[in-house]
Amino acid sequence: MVGATASALIGVMNPLLTKLSGLLEREYGKLKGVGREVALLRDELSSMNTALEAVSDSEEEPSSQVKEWMRQLRELSYDVEDCIDVFVHRLGHHDPGDGLFRRTKRRLKALWSRHCIAGQIAELKDRAVLVNDRRKRYELDAAASSSAAIAIDSRLPALFEEMDRLVGIEGPRDELVEFLMGGINLAPQRRVVSIVGFGGLGKTTLANQVYQHIKSQFDRTAFVSVSRNPNVNKILANILIGILETRKLSSVHQKQHSDTIEDLKHKTFEDCKLISLIRENLQNSRYFIVIDDIWDKAAWRDHLRFAFPENNSASRIITTTRINDVAIACHFSHEDFIYAMKPLSSENSEALFFRRIFSSKEKCPPELEEVADDILKKCDGLPLAIVSIASLLSCKPVTKQEWVWVLNSFGSTVMKDQGSHELAVVKRILFLSYSDLPHHLKSCLLYLSIFPEDHTITRDFLISRWIAEGFITEQRGESLEEVGEKYFNELINRNIVQSFEIDPFSRREAYRMHDIMLDLMISLSTEENFATILDGQHCAPSSNKIHRFSLQCKSVERITWLRTTSFSHARSLSVFGDFNKIPPLVDLEVLRVLDLLNCSSLKDDHIENIGSLFQLRYVRLGNISRIPRQIGKLKLLQTLDLSGTA
C-alpha cells in the first residue's frame, strides 16, 4: 500500500531532516565550501518528504514506478545520513593545547576531508534533484486525492459464522452476558463493556455472539462497525437505521418509517441532527448497541457517546477495539467493564483446527499430527490464523508434503499471499495494526524483526537500541529515555507487543510479538530493505545495501556469502548462535549497534578493531576474557553491556 510504504519512509527521513537542520544551525562554521550544498540537499529532501506526507494515508497499492521511486529515496536518505556522520567525525574538535605542528597537521587533514566530502555531498545533492524530478513526473502528489480500491470487509465471516463452527466462545460469551444481564432489574444504569485485544483474536465474533444471544430482550438494537478511517456521519446514520428497523410500529406509521430509513440510506444529514434523532428514539427505551472496531478515542469522545442517553432503563453498549486507551475512553462510569481477549487454549486450538479440516481430531491421519502441532504452535492461539490455515489445508491434498509446504511458506506468504485468499485475510487484518501507527513508531516496530522467534526482549534493552539507531529524538522537557518509554508503552497500549513474566520472584517482565505478527514484520522489513535477516527461512541474500544485519542461521552457503558481501552501510550487527565468523569490524564504518552477546563462539580477536567504529553507540558483548582497550575511543558510546562476559 502506498500509505504504509510512504509512512515507513517518513520514519526514515524525519530524523535525517532534523539532523541536517541541526547541522546547518550549530555547525555552519565547519561547513565551509559545502554549507550551501547541504542546505540545497535538505530542501530537496524536505520537498519529497512533504509529498510523502500527502500520500501517507492512501490505501492504494503503489505502482512499480512509485515503488522504485520510494526505493531510490530511501537509499538516498541512508547515504546522506552516512555521509554527514562521516563528515562531522572527520572534522572533529580541536584541542586548544595542541602545538603548531599538530594544529597544522589537523588543518591539512580537515581541508582534505572537506574536499573529499564536498564531492560526495555535491553528488548526493544531484541525486536528490533527479529523484525529486522523478517524483514530479510520476505525479505522486496526485495519488493523495485519487480514489482507493474498495476493500472487502474482512469482518464479515465473524458476523455470519455459525455457532456450531465456533470453539471456546461459550465461556467468554456467558461471562459478558452475566455482566450485562445479571440483576438487570437491580442495575438500571446504562452499562458499557469494552472488548479489547490484538487483531485476529475474535473480538467481533464474541461481540456478535453476545449480541445475538440477548438482543431479543431489548426494545432497540443496532450493530455497527467503525473501522480505522471512520466516517462518523455514516456510522451515526447506520446506528439510527438499526434502531428504526427494530422499532415496532403500527401499520399507520409504517410507510413514514420506511421513508425515513430510505432517506438515511441515500441522503446526508448533519451529525447533530442524527444524534438528536438517535437520542429521541432511545430516550424511553431499553437499548442495546454494539460499536465494533473503534480505532480512535476522538470518534467516541467527540461524537458517538452523545448519542446514547442515560435513561435508567438498563440499556447496554458493547465496544470493540485493539487499543487499551480507546477501551478506557469508551466508559461512562467506573462500573463499566473492560474484557481483555485471550488466545485460545491448546485444547481449543486443536479442536478448532481439526474440526475445520476433518470434523474431529480422531480423523486426522497419524503422519500429519506432528506437522499439525507445529502449525498450531505458529498460530499460538490466534483464531483468525487457525481458521485461515485450516481453510487453506481443507482444499489441498491430505499429504504431509502439502502440510509442510504450508508451514514453511507461511512466513513469506503472509505478505505475498501467493494466490491464497485465506492468508491474504490474515495479512489484511494484522497489517491494519501496523498501518495505523504514526510514522516514528513504524521504524520502532520494524526493528523487532531482527530478533529471532521466542527471543527474550526487555523494555530497557529495546529502548536503548532504539536510541542508538536514532529512532528517538528529544522532545521538549523529556529525555530520550522518557520519549522511548512513551513509544514502548504505545506499542503495548495497542496490543502489538505483549508482556510475560520471566522471573516470578522479581516479577521481571519481558516482551514479545505474536509469531505471525513477527512474520509480517520480517516480510515488511525485507520489502523496505530495513533489515537483512539470515535465519534459514525468511530472507535470502540480495543485491541491496545492508543497513541492519541479523545473523541467525549457520550454513556453508551463508558463511561463504558473509565473506563476499559488503557491510560498509550496516548500522547494526546482531548475531544469535554459534558463529566463528562475523563481518570484519574494520569494514563497518557507520555501525551504531553491535550486539554479540548471543554469539557463543565470540573470541577476543573478533573485536580487536572495535575502536575504529566511531559511530558506535550501543555495544553488548559476551564470551570474551577481557574488555578491549579500544572501547575508550568510542566517543559516542551510550550503552556498554558486559553482563554476558566473564
Image (cartoon, rainbow, N blue to C red):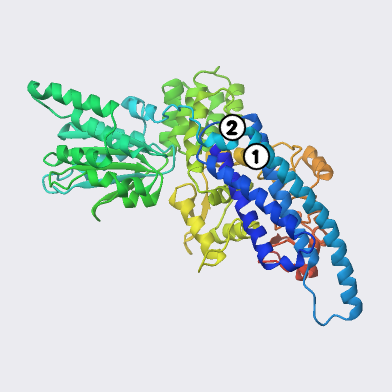
Q: Nearer the viewer, residue 381 or 37?
A: 37
Dot 2 crowding, Cα within 10 Å, few <14, some 14–19, many 20+:
some
305 relative position to 5: left or right: left
> Which residue is at 80% across, 40% downward?
561
Dots 2 and 1: beta carbons under 8 Å? yes
Q: Position of residue 46 (x, y in %)?
A: 62, 50
Residue under pointer 1: 70
* Placement of the C terminus among the 4 image quadrants: bottom right
**Residue beneath the point at 54% across and 18% down:** 396
Measured from the top left, where is residue 250 in percent x and y? 8, 24
The kind of residue on which mark 1 rests is Met
Q: Amino acid at mark 2?
A: Pro
Q: Does 520 appear above or below 598?
A: above
**Vertical placement of residue 421 versus 37, above or below:** above
**Residue occupying image coordinates x 49% and y 33%:** 428
Q: Is residue 421 left or right of residue 323?
A: right
> What is the crowding at mark 1: few (fewer than 14 residues within 10 Å), some, or many (at least 20)?
many
Q: Residue 476: give x, y in percent of width and height.
A: 51, 66
- CA–CA distance between discs 2 and 1? 10 Å
One can see residue 518 in this view: yes
Q: Is residue 197 left or right of residue 288?
A: right
Residue designated by label 2: 62
Residue 598 appears anywhere in the view: no
Secondary-structure class at tag 2: loop
